[in-house]
Amino acid sequence: MADAKLDAQFAAEVVADAAAIGNFTLRTTDFLKAAGVDARAVHHVVLVLEEVLTNLATHGGAPTEPARVRITVEPARVAGEIIDAGAQFDPRRAPRPDVKAGVNDRLVGGLGLVLVNRLTSELDYARQDGRNRLVFSVARSAAHVHGNG
Amino acid sequence: MVITEHTHGRVLLLTASGRLDGSTSAAFTARIEPLISGNEPRLVLDFAGVDFISSAGLRAVLSLFKQIKAARGAFALCAVQPPVLEVLDISGFTNLIPIHAERAAALAAVSLD
């Protein structure tokens, strides 16, 4: 566990609609870059946030309370937590499209959750108090650690 | 997302910069579709300035590729930043769409194709 005093942290509440998600992911990108996180980890942390929040916006059953997101930059990884009041959904158990299919057989859905599973080195889910709680991390630096693919 | 048009012989080169995500992909598609509406469109998309892509962006790229294939045209991506390339690879797009490191190679391939 890293020394909490040295960890940079970013927390926000996000309404699940495309414009708010776009604004939030831009701010998160700026925060991660300012904290010195490498380009790969910046990209993939922001990707996980965008995919999970977009999924909530599309399939979450329009929760009235915003999602709560917390991002912590640790020495070896970036850790994230997303808590939302949407429909129960465990992204680890989502159906996956065939990423080896040819162009004519390609389905347009499901790719986002493939990416969430492949780009995170940790991905944990729990349903608590009527909310989804997703905890994830992405490794920093060039050390590619794919744990859930 | 900013898209700039250039013509190289019979190839249309579009340089894109910015983010290709859920809030920008619809505009990206709307900007490019009219440019590839003819017969046998030849398109190179230079992604050097694209620093973010999500599944919404992947769907937009796949949709362009399908339209170009249906019109018996040719398409390639070039100069893709490493994190974006990793996403394309995991999604299986590197086996589907020609991707070149250098713009010149992409232009040459799409001219001949």
Image (tube, rainbow, N blue to C red):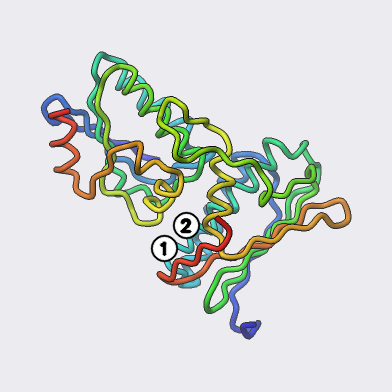
Q: Is residue B75 left or right of residue B94?
A: left
Which quadrant, please, contains the C terminus of chain B?
top left
Q: Position of residue A55 (x, y in %)?
A: 65, 41
Provide the chain ID for the residue under circle 2. Answer: A
Q: In the rendered structure, find residue B87 and report the number of the disc placed on it.
A: none
Provide the chain ID for the residue under circle 1. Answer: A
- Considering every residue shown, the one lying at the far top of the view is B39
Residue type, numbered disc 1: Ala
Q: Is residue A147 left or right of residue A93?
A: left
- Considering every residue shown, the one lying at the far right of the view is A129
Q: Quadrant of residue A138?
A: bottom right
Q: Position of residue A144 (x, y in %)?
A: 45, 66
Secondary element at tag 2: helix
Whole-angstrom CA distance, mark 2 to mark 1, is: 6 Å
Which residue is at a point 32% across and 41% down the rendered structure image?
B16
Which residue is at a point 43% across and 46% down the rendered structure image?
B19
**Label 2 packing within 10 angstroms: few (<14), some (14-19), many (20+):** many
Q: Position of residue A40 (x, y in %)?
A: 43, 62
Q: In the rendered structure, find residue A43 and report the number of the disc placed on it.
A: 2
Q: How many marks?
A: 2
Which residue is at a point 69% across and 42% down the rendered structure image?
A56
**Label 1 packing within 10 angstroms: few (<14), some (14-19), many (20+):** some
Q: Quadrant of residue A80?
A: bottom right
User: Disc 2 vs disc 1: Cβ atoms closer than 8 Å?
Assistant: yes
Which residue is at a point 44% across and 42% down the rendered structure image?
B20
Mark 1 = which residue?
A39
Of A114 and A83, which appears nearest the observer? A114
Q: Position of residue A88 (x, y in %)?
A: 79, 45
Which quadrant, please, contains the N terminus of chain B?
top left
Of A45 and B110, which appears nearest the observer? B110
Q: Is residue A131 left or right of residue B28?
A: right
